[in-house]
Image (cartoon, helix red, strand yellow):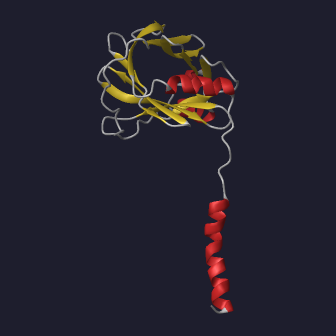
Amino acid sequence: MSIKKYIIAVIVSLPITATLMAAEAPLVSIKTQDDFFNSISKHCGKSYEGKVTVDNAAGGSFANKKLVMHVRKCTDSQLQVPFHVGDDSSRTWIITKTGSGLSLKHDHRHKDGSNDKSTMYGGHTNDAGWPQMQSFPADQYSKELFVEQGIPQSVGNTWQMYIYPEKFTYRLIRQGREFRVDFDLTKPINTPKAPWGYE
């Protein structure tokens, strides 16, 4: 091989060699958050029925409807948990390890799978929390979305999730507002269909 061809061969192979040597940065985590995440992940593939236990808003839209959470998809860094309200399969909770805590997002879709105008709002942990509970104060994207949509009172939202051997709780709180659904983890039920926009 000529020197010219050898040099070209080395140059061409450099990006491949560099790619093989590069390693992903470690995903930094906190034990309490890992324990919380893993406790939910243990229920992967299972579904549970819940009921509204607190709702101080008049005419709650979830009243008299079957409420089902389905721990549908789990990876080492993300949990996807559809929340079915009667025949409405528009909601999916997405819990993600970010390297600086946990993120909770609400993926809202229309029946055709397209994004709702109010989607991917949520929050991010700002402390270690507990293995049984994590709080997600509204993030900046959500605050701007709420103001844009004319619901500035939601800027103060904090979402909380609790996980115990017998019960999972989803809770929303802000000044003057509380909403809570408790799911019975002792009685798995039939898995519902995929949420809207998912396969």
Residue in front for this viewpoint, 129 or 86: 129
Please state the horizontal and vertical placement of residue 161, each as a whole percent of the image. 55, 19
Please state the horizontal and vertical placement of residue 31, each as a whole percent of the image. 68, 26
Please give left or right for residue 190 compared with residue 35 in the image.
Answer: left
Please state the horizontal and vertical placement of residue 184, each as a whole percent of the image. 42, 11
| Location of the C terminus (image quadrant) | top left
Please state the horizontal and vertical placement of residue 188, each as a whole percent of the image. 37, 17
Q: Is residue 188 above or below residue 19?
A: above
Q: How many numbered markers are drawn?
A: 0
Q: Residue at x 41, y 35 (%)?
A: 116
Is residue 152 something one can see in this rendering?
no
Please give left or right for residue 141 compared with residue 199 in the image.
Answer: right
Q: Residue furthest front?
A: 1
Q: Residue at x 70, y 24 (%)?
A: 127
Determine which quarter of the picture holds residue 73. Answer: top left
Is residue 22 something one can see in this rendering?
yes
Q: Is residue 91 above or below residue 26?
A: above
Q: Residue at x 30, y 39 (%)?
A: 112
Q: Is residue 122 above or below residue 63?
A: below
Q: Residue furthest bottom?
A: 2
Q: Residue at x 46, y 11 (%)?
A: 182
